[in-house]
Image (tube, rainbow, N blue to C red):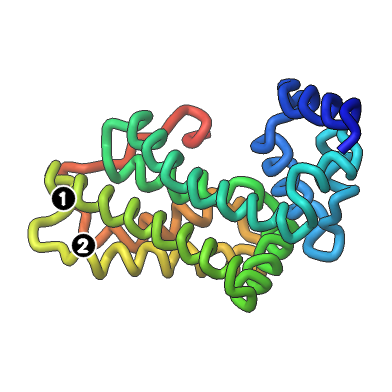
Amino acid sequence: MNRHLLTRRLVAMARPRAVEDGVILRAAARVMGQMGPAGLTLAAVAREVGLVPGTLVQRFGSKRGLLLALADLSAREAEELTARVRQEHTSALDALAALTVEASAGMETPESFAHHLAFLCTDLTDPELYERALAVHQARGRAVHALLAEAAAAGELRAGTDLAALARTVQAITAGAGLTWALDRRGTLAERLREELDAVLSPHVAHTHSHSRTDSEES
């Protein structure tokens, strides 16, 4: 290899990245919600983050490489989100409500929900993307079960509650709530998720517990 070319490559490798991969991947998630599968291109993501498409090719290789990296980031952030909401709420059930709502970030409109749903349908038919989608689903399932177990230990839930069954129901109901909301468009997605979660938990909640609400939630 030409010595000067090698020197330039080594300098480029040593130079700090002006835009971190995580910033690019979160921009890709925004483009997903805005444009759907057909509109998600390296050029569209590059415009969103203020780079040239060639930079994304260097980082991720292709659109598929970008999608795989985004899926890996989603799996990691599913664990991080659980830890954060648990720190922010004294009550495990309040943390569960926050987790349910924040996990749907980026799907505030029926159109953005539909676009993300279209990507999920693609994930289900692609072995590598399916593996990562399953990892996210399982991470959230563990988080829901852990928060319910904490709630039971703290007396927020009735004694004898079948936590495993309740955790499965919570995941199923919250997944279906998004689709129902996108169809009937009543209220916001966050409101619908909390409404359906409350309905599922209500028969199991001890009388001494009541969900705390911030001023913005009550208004």
Disc 1 and disc 2: Cα gap in Å?
Answer: 8 Å
Q: Amino acid at mark 2?
A: Leu
127 relative to 111, above or below:
below
> SS for tag 1?
helix
Numbered circles on residues, count: 2
Residue at which label 2 appears:
163
Quadrant of the image occupied by residue 91: top left
Tell me if 99 is positioned left or right of 106 in this view.
Answer: left
Q: Position of residue 153 (x, y in %)?
A: 12, 46
Q: Position of residue 51 (x, y in %)?
A: 87, 34
Residue closer to the observer: 77 or 149: 77
Q: Position of residue 47 (x, y in %)?
A: 89, 40
Q: Position of residue 192 (x, y in %)?
A: 52, 56
> SS for tag 2?
helix
At horizontal 84% and vertical 39% (from top left) the residue drawn is: 55
Residue 38 makes an appearance in the image: yes
At horizontal 44% and vertical 39% (from top left) the residue drawn is: 80
Q: Are marks 1 and 2 in contact (CB under 8 Å)?
A: yes
Residue 101 makes an appearance in the image: no
Residue at which label 1 appears:
152
Label 2: how many Cα within 10 Å (few below 14, some 14–19, many 20+): some
Label 1: how many Cα within 10 Å (few below 14, some 14–19, many 20+): many
At horizontal 79% and vertical 52% (from top left) the residue drawn is: 34
144 relative to 172, above or below:
above
Q: Which mark is residue 112?
A: none
Q: Residue furthest bottom?
A: 125
Mark 1 and mark 2 lie on one chain; the one further toward the N terminus is 1
**Screen quadrant of the N terminus:** top right
